[in-house]
Amino acid sequence: MQVNKKGQEEIVGFVAIVLLVAIIGVVFLGLMLRNNTPVAQESKDVMRLIESGMQYTSDCAIDYIPNYATLQDLIQKCYEQPSSSCQSGDRICSALNRTLLGILDGTINVGPDNKNKGYIFKTEFTYNVSAGNGTEILKVIKGNCSTDSFNEGYSSFQGQKGEYISTLRICY
Amino acid sequence: MIKTNILHVKFTRKAQMKIQEMAFVLVAIMIFFAIVGIFYIKIGFNGFSGDIQQQRAEAAMELVRKIASTPEFGFTKNGEMICDSCIDTDKVMALKNMSAYKGFWNIDFFRLDYVYPQKKNIECSYGTYPNCSTITLSNAVNHETPATAYVSLCRNEYANNQLYTKCELGKVEISAKSINALGVSNASQ
């Protein structure tokens, strides 16, 4: 039986190419399906958490009891009158730190084994929102937030001198 | 007798090669399109699933906003709402045992949970309120998985013989047929 060597080589080469392409495709597909692409998205749930947190009534009474300040009041007072104190004698800014950390730690479980790896909360003050370039007045970082996957929300309120914009990023 | 050779076909090796090549090309194309198809379906399904979850969450938040803005739930100070998501727990406690409001909002499941500060893990009643963790207003037997949203749970308290507003951080868990149908119209009636 006469065998066409050239034809055989052609077939073997072609099969090799097909197999190679198929293997590369399968590996590529496997990697794509396994690794979730990093997602950075605005979350209404996070936004609602900040908005609700801003209304939280702290144990810091300003001027008289029971004029207890909300978290929003504490942020404003801490920036505009940093030397002022609560009726209990605590500094406003330390009451702010204590209240804010309590809320964040009470609502977001952070850890390497948890769904949430970390969070960043920050508040900026700006005289004019459209001009941008706000002054960072508060920043809390907990856990690992170096990943590109996070949910972020923001909330703002108007103070006497300008606008306060708070942003919370929850990394997962 | 005439001998015919009409049905005799001569297959050449070159033609066989061509057929085999074509068969391999077809197989390769099929594999390629199968991979692309699986990839497309997977991505499409993920996006669709994410869209549904997001729409359910948004529908729940919209429902919460509507409920919080009703006079029966919203917290008002000097006649004005203090925030979009501030729920008056004193009113909710009053509504809890009013039979006239049973089924009024067409909600299968409605529960308020105190998130921060943490409280004793007990259902609120006239005896335990406000030192309790949950207020369940509606709990139908076969309700769907509830959607959740953060809210402010506010009430009036007294100190030094003066009334003041105390708001705590909470979550509302809500499930209604309208949410599961990605709408809020029925539940807000």
Image (cartoon, coloured by chain):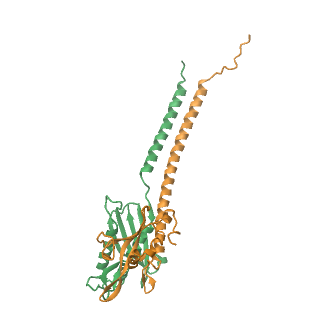
Chain colours: A green, B orange
The reply to whether residue A133 is in sight is no
Q: Quadrant of residue B109?
A: bottom left
User: Quadrant location of the N terminus of chain B?
Assistant: top right
Residue B15 can be seen, yes or no: yes
| Residue at (45% x, 85% y) in the render | B79
Residue at coordinates 52% horizontally, 34% vertically from top-left?
A14
On the image, the x and y values in percent for residue A20 come to 47, 39
B94 in relation to A150, above or below? below
Is A68 rendered above or below residue A118?
below
Out of A139 and B115, give the one closest to the viewer. Answer: B115
Front-most of residues B20 and B103: B103
Q: Residue at x 34, y 64 (%)?
A: A118
Name the residue at the top extreme: B1
Specify the quadrant of the image occupied by residue A42: bottom left
Please determine whether, in this image, residue B45 is positioned above or below residue B163.
above
Residue A124 x/y as whole percent: 40, 76
